[in-house]
Amino acid sequence: MRLFTPGEVVVRREVLHGKVWSEMPTRVIVDEPGLLAVFVEPGTRLTYPDHHHPHPWDKPERGFWRGHGKLMLHRPQDAYSVDLFWKGDDRVFGNYYLNLQAPYRRVEDGFETLDHALDYTLAPDGTWAQRDLDEFEEQVASGKYSAGEAEAIRAEGLKIEKMLASGEIWWDTAWADWRPSSDWR
């Protein structure tokens, strides 16, 4: 599959049980063999096709991305992305958000993955926290994941906890200073 061109808009698609669960356009920032970085622009429309397992964000108030957008860093084979968020009128870096998800798979118009609900935040000062454990366990109970899939997701979470506790992160912290092009609309 081809590498995407910086500036190109590609679709991030979540696929659950073989059927599209959600879609969002993203803008490619970097695409090279070891890193796919994409940006979700403020105001991006989020869609949730009909699915037998409704997406938890499928609500009128969650139809568009708000805030300053988010930058998502993906490495091939990682079962998480590192998402960067900014806050306030001055667009100050807020935090890293490690979003557990299936390793991405390239398709012609973008990439496919599946959010695993379990997440971690990492503040600029190095403090971190696990997030959404209750939501993850509810999704396990509802059949979103098999017992084996749930155990693999928990194991990935433990690997992330060890990385965060050691302070040895793989991504360049200079991404916190990254800014989207003013030409993008």
Image: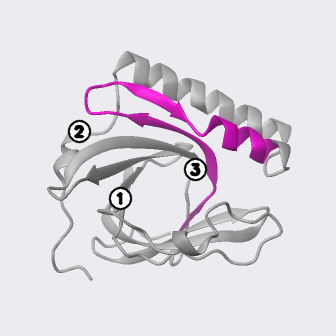
- The residue shown at (79%, 63%) is 53
Label 2 vs 1, first from the N-terminus: 1
Q: Amino acid at mark 1?
A: Lys
Question: In this rendering, would 121 be left or right of 53?
Answer: left
Disc 3 marks which amino acid? Answer: Pro
Residue extent of the magenta highlight? 111-140
- Above or below, 33 against 99 in this view is below
Say which quarter of the image contains residue 58: bottom right
Residue at x 75%, y 66% (from the top left corner): 54
Q: Is residue 14 above or below residue 123?
A: below
| Residue at the disc numbered 1 | 70
User: Residue 19, position in %: x, y?
Assistant: 75, 70
**Disc 2/disc 3 C-alpha distance (Å):** 22 Å
The alpha-carbon separation of the residues under discs 2 and 1 comes to 15 Å
Q: Which residue is mark 2?
A: 173
Q: Is residue 145 magenta?
A: no
- Alpha-carbon neighbours of circle 2 within 10 Å: few (<14), some, or many (≥20)? few
Q: Which residue is mark 3?
A: 103
Point out residue 5 in the picture as x, y percentages from the top left corner. 32, 73
